[in-house]
Amino acid sequence: MKDLVMETRVDTQTIKIKAEKAQVFYGTNHAIKDVDVEIMDKTVTAFIGPSGCGKSTFLRCLNRMNDTIPSCRVEGSITLDGDDIYDARVDPVQLRAKVGMVFQKPNPFPKSIYDNVAYGPKIHGLTRTKAELDEVVESCLRKAALWNEVKDRLHSPGTGLSGGQQQRLCIARAIATSPEVLLMDEPCSALDPIATAQVEELIDELRSQFSVVIVTHSMQQAARVSQRTAFFHLGNLVEFGETGQIFTNPKDPRTESYITGRIG
Amino acid sequence: MSGSLFTLDARTKARNAAERRFRAYGLGAIVIALLALVWLLISIFSAGLPAFRQTFLTFPVTLDASQLDKSGTGDVAQLSKITTITYAKILGQSLEAAIAAKGIDLGGAKPKQVADLISQESAATLRSKVMADPALIGTTIDFTTLASGRIDGYYKGRVTMDSAALDKNTSPEQLRLADKLKEAGMLAVRFNTGFLTMPDASDKRPEAAGLGIAILGSFMIMAVVLVLSLPIGVAASIYLEEFAPKNWITDLIEVNIANLAAVPSIVYGILGLAIFINFAGLPQSAPIVGGLVLTLMTLPRIIIPTRAALKAVPPSIRDAALGVGASRLQTVFHHVLPLAMPGILTGMIIGLAQALGETAPLLLIGMVAFVRDVPGGLFDPASALPVQVYNWTQRGDPGFVERASGAIIVLLVFLIIMNTAAIILRRKFERRW
Ligand SMILES: Nc1ncnc2c1ncn2[C@@H]1O[C@H](COP(=O)(O)OP(=O)(O)O)[C@@H](O)[C@H]1O
Ligand SMILES: [Mg+2]
């Protein structure tokens, strides 16, 4: 395990998202308990932990996707650049343009590749002319390392791509709204190893522009792509720190059992 | 579980036998259903197709000025005092003269019987023709008109020499004369566009009865139903499915919609009579009331499939749209609705097709009235196709039985067109995700 950890370094110390005493309930089920997390700008933060420990739940709190679940209730404070995102004045729609999301299963719109990427800029009015929009689409597809594969068939359906291409298309779609934070919920779990490697490489490049939060069940992946890692267990944040430290020198015995494969 | 793969064990044999039995039941059920359908179609088409053909008489009619324009001035007010009785007389005389001119032997038929070969409707037709063009008076025109219902029935096998002998409305002499006229080219059986364009006719004139007003009325009713139930139904479904909070009130609404879809249609007729006619004071027999009543009936039947279609759109699409910062309304209109469209359209058209064939509620709001005048708008009396079918089956003259079956064919054709449209739209809008 230890040899997998890259020599990584946290680039900045600006706090982008800060959660304090965050609680999430699904009805009476207390899914997230007292979580305190600081997510740095221009950093990849990985959430790891056994299935059902609340990684997705917490991730979805960060762009208020949980609002769509009627039974879900969030308490505590979560701030983006110091603003409480659960404040009554915050429109979740505006928040989600700033905090983009990539889902576990690739979910391109059943529209053309071009329209998939262009949708966000269109609804947010980010571009004024068709030429500008074309430019945004191209640059996002390039950033998502998909341009060369799809440049000749921009107007064929996005659902016709392979799984890995679809996921990269979803990443392109997410970054097209110029978000500040990109949330990814197990983005590689439906992908083969080659596509996974491509997406991981991509995440590393995206770090230069965004703050990335990635949920993963693969510790190797966390070790490869992240600079900071949070370990969740049964709704609690057990340990949070630099990835190197978590994997080489875990402080909590539960973290150690998990990364050595004793709980899973 | 030992033994050769080539010998079937008892369990496998029993399973295979069960499967074969099940296939046989299924096949049997389908064969029975198909036979019933074929039987239905054969009986309707054999009874109804003759309604699309009609017996016509063609002969020169001398529009005698001394009878039609006694004042000799051509004054329209004077002309309109001449009733159809005079025109009937002229028609009878002209036909007799034409028969004599061709040298055909009357074979014992009396002048009254000769005149009765012509439909009673013809005098009115001739009168309106002359009133529209008074210059015709004094000339001789080639006039093609309906033969009477009995003569028409003779060429469709409904009337025979034996039945004519017992029938006070016709006689074997008439039929024999009709055969001679046919040979001489004065009588012919042809396609009858009038069946689709003419209004209903009175009990004695089945040959003149048409579906014109019923088709027009049904179209108007369907237009009202479409215009009202499409936006209301789709808006209600979208609200309930995508926006409404899930609580006991929405649960109650949901249960009630399901119940309303199962309410017998006649109940909507009673409701319509009470609300739209007795309370709101809308006119009886009007397509607007028919449309409103059928809208009430159709709404739950549209909301249920529309909600099902919306529910069938995968949640991942909603997540994707919300995830890039689309509002809920944008999510619904840009992504969910297009994907649900095939299902919504199919539900819509099937709901409309049900409404098109609905009779009972229309009877209650008075659409069964006898209407001869083309409705000028939604508030004028009109008829409707299924009501016309019901109406004609109540009439005594066997000519109307054929008309009723013909009307059923028209109704079926409309339904088939609508269902085909549903299938085509479904194919067109269907997309994978
Ligand atoms: N939509 C939901 N409604 C109710 N409970 C949920 C929902 N989603 C997740 N949960 C519960 O919240 C807990 C955490 O789930 P989740 O965040 O999906 O875990 P993870 O992503 O770490 O596997 C689980 O106990 C799960 O049953
Ligand atoms: Mg998860």
Image: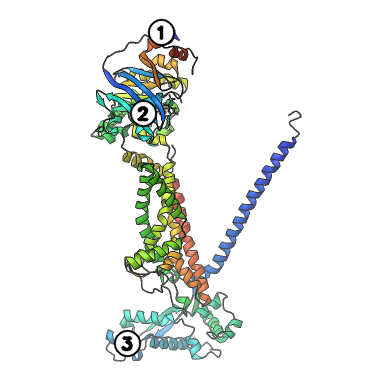
Q: Position of residue A220 (x, y in %)?
A: 44, 15
Please tell me which residue lies in front, B287 or A171. Answer: B287
User: Could you tell me which secondary element the residue under label 2 belongs to?
Assistant: loop
Residue at x 43% of width, y 64% of height: B361
Q: Given the image, what chain letter belongs to the residue carrying mark 3?
A: B
Identify residue type, mark 1.
Asn
Q: Relative to B189, does residue A204 appear above or below in the rendering? A: above
Q: Tag 1 or tag 2, which sits nearer the N-term?
A: 2
Contact, mark 3 vs mark 1 (Cβ under 8 Å): no
Query: Label 1: which residue?
Result: A249
The answer to whether residue A154 is seen in the rendering is no
Drawn side of residue B156 relative to residue A87, left or right: right
Query: Label 2: which residue?
Result: A151
The label nearer to you, 2 versus 1, is 1
**Whole-number angstrom distance, CA of label 3 to CA of label 2:** 83 Å
User: Could you tell me which secondary element the residue under label 1 belongs to?
Assistant: loop
Please tell me which residue lies in front, B134 or A51. Answer: A51
Q: Position of residue B285 (x, y in %)?
A: 38, 69
Image quadrant in which the N terminus of chain B is located: top right
Q: Relative to B117, does residue B8 appear above or below in the rendering? A: above
User: Could you tell me which secondary element the residue under label 3 belongs to?
Assistant: loop
Residue at x 42% of width, y 40% of height: B313
Label 2 neighbour load within 10 Å: few <14, some 14-19, many 20+: some
Q: Quadrant of ligand 2?
A: top left
Q: Relative to A185, does residue B310 appear above or below in the rendering? A: below
Residue B81's label in the rendered image is 3
The label nearer to you, 3 versus 1, is 1
